Image (spheres, rainbow, N blue to C red):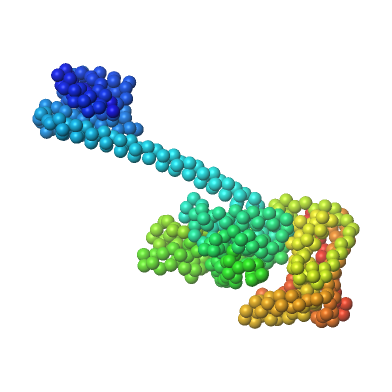
Amino acid sequence: MRILVVDPSETNRFYLKQILEKNGYQVLFASNGLDAYQIFETESFDLVISEITLPFMSAYDLVKKIKSHSLQQMIPVFIVTDEVSSEVIQNVLEVGADDFLQKPYSEQLFLAKIRSLIRMKRLTSELYESHQTISLLHKNLELEHRSAERIFEKFVHGPGKLVPGLETHVTPASIFNGDVFLSTVMPSGSVLVLLGDFTGHGLPAAIGAIPVAEVFYSMVKRGRTPGEVLNVINSKLKDILPIHIFFGCIMMKIQPNRRTVSVFNAGMQPIIQLTSDTRETRQFKSTSPPLGILDNKDMTFDFTSVNVSSNDSFFLYTDGIIEVLDNQREMFGVERLVEVMTSYENPGIPDLVDAAKEFSKDSLFEDDVSIIKLSMKAILKETQQQLLQASNTDIKPASQWRLTFEFCHRNIKINGNPTEGIVDAIMAMQPLISFKEDLYLVISELYINAVEHGLLNLDSSLKDEEDGFQKFNQQKRDRLSLLEEGKVTICINQTPTSNYAGNIKIKVFHEGQQFTSKMGKIPEPIDESDHAFSGRGLFLVQSLCQSLELDVVQACATAVYTWQQPEVMNEI
């Protein structure tokens, strides 16, 4: 340990030198304040012992300079003096001196104070080094968080297409957000949005957003249906999420050309539809458990379809806003949210946020808050061509081709629904990304109809009963396991009608034990208020195709799907 002794008295310096060196300290000397400060600037030491009265530079100034130039390490200053004035000693302590000792003093007390000050210096140095280490770790952690945040934002929000009529409000409770909002324009020209909420918030909740976004954007780009997208998301989350984290999810598909909206709510707050001219509201509550909990075989991804007008808006939100508490610990709630909406002619998201803050008397939300408003007026006015251009799709000239697929009972039992592979084969013959979703729905519904009603003789009206879907699926599994013969044949034949238009005839046959049984009947058009769950598949096919015919005797369904490139449509 090195100690600087500052004292104009040579006798005092010699006395202190004897004591200090005898106890193992290395001693440096200065006879005045100016020399002492010069030594301070060029040498390193652990303690300064100084007299108050110094020539050239006072002890006050010396203490101030030493303290102001040693901010990153502690250099204790110990005053040893003949001064008896308490005011003088008080002043030198106030400018930064760490301790003092009046003469005469005992050698033991002097050395005890020396050891105490050096111990304090060592502890301070260790504290400073710990602080430096923590600061460095904090900076590195912050840098990693920011990098991860940029990657997260780019991954989750980057691939999305510009969606008309969309307003968003996203307030994360921490750097990362457990809420997920994805939107895009599908190759078919439909608008697809997904709002989800992982349990909790912060990084553990946000980490699941990456696979959700990857599945959403990659599958939509390839023309997969919303149901397929949800199916894969659920399967992936079921595999990777810990049991205490799940994913509440809303998916909405807006088809401007058909002026319909299809909604799916899995464990989220009710979707609110507001009609601005009448200020009437309709709620779409959860019809499914959140994703990531059950296997796909125990889930159904049925969408509710509703006709809309340009006066309609849809509000999607996570529970962060309705769980805002007031001073009495009462929640803001869905009912108050609806009251706020209906109190405005055209409510905006800021109106809802301000109302929640006014209710809580607090400008901060304790949870992630996401609110989405979809205005049909802006979406419905977009032409099919504008939306298709937004989806960057490209359609090749039409050509003549024919594809035939045959599935025996063993294929049907093992592989489930082969529609995805069939549509991929069609895309290889005729790239029809914009129409891929429609083709998938048509072929999938016809194949399922042939299997469920043709081969397995199931009755869809069972779905209308309580727990009907579970009973229906159980019957399907039971009968499928007993299936010992039968096959389904799918013939697809495209005939060009122009360079950029064509008819695709899809014929689905089945044969087996129930060869003569019913394949299902084309139902009457379904009223919006009809909540029956059976008979919708063939009606959907009929609505998508130019024609649909069922031949019960021949066990054959024939649908003709017509496609036409939008630019050609505008020329007509």
Q: Please tell me which residue is depicted at 15% across the width and 34% down the height of the picture.
A: 109
Name which residue lies at 25% across and 21% down: 28
Q: Nearer the viewer, residue 45 or 364?
A: 45
Residue at image position (23%, 30%) is 77
* Quadrant into which the C terminus falls: bottom right
Asked if residue 217 lies left or right of residue 50, the reply is right
Q: Is residue 472 left or right of residue 350?
A: right
> Residue 451 location, x and y as percent?
78, 74
| Position of the N terminus by quadrant | top left
Give the image quarter of residue 438: bottom right
Q: Is residue 410 above or below residue 101?
A: below
Q: Is residue 187 positioned above or below 477 on the image?
A: above
Q: Please identify the quarter of the rendering in which residue 410 is found.
A: bottom right
* Place of residue 525 in the rendered image (x, y in percent of width and height, measured from the top left): 73, 76
For residue 62, say whether it is visible: no
**Residue situated in front as seen by the camera: 568 or 122:** 122
Determine which quarter of the picture holds residue 413.
bottom right
How many circles with numbers are drawn on the protein? 0
Q: Nearer the viewer, residue 247 or 40?
A: 40
Horizontal and vertical percent position of residue 515: 84, 79
Which x, y percent locates residue 293?
A: 58, 66
Asked if residue 70 can be seen in this view, the reply is: yes
The one of 100 and 275 positioned closer to us in this rendering: 100
Q: Residue at x 44, y 58 (%)?
A: 365
Residue 511 higher or lower than 143, as above or below: below
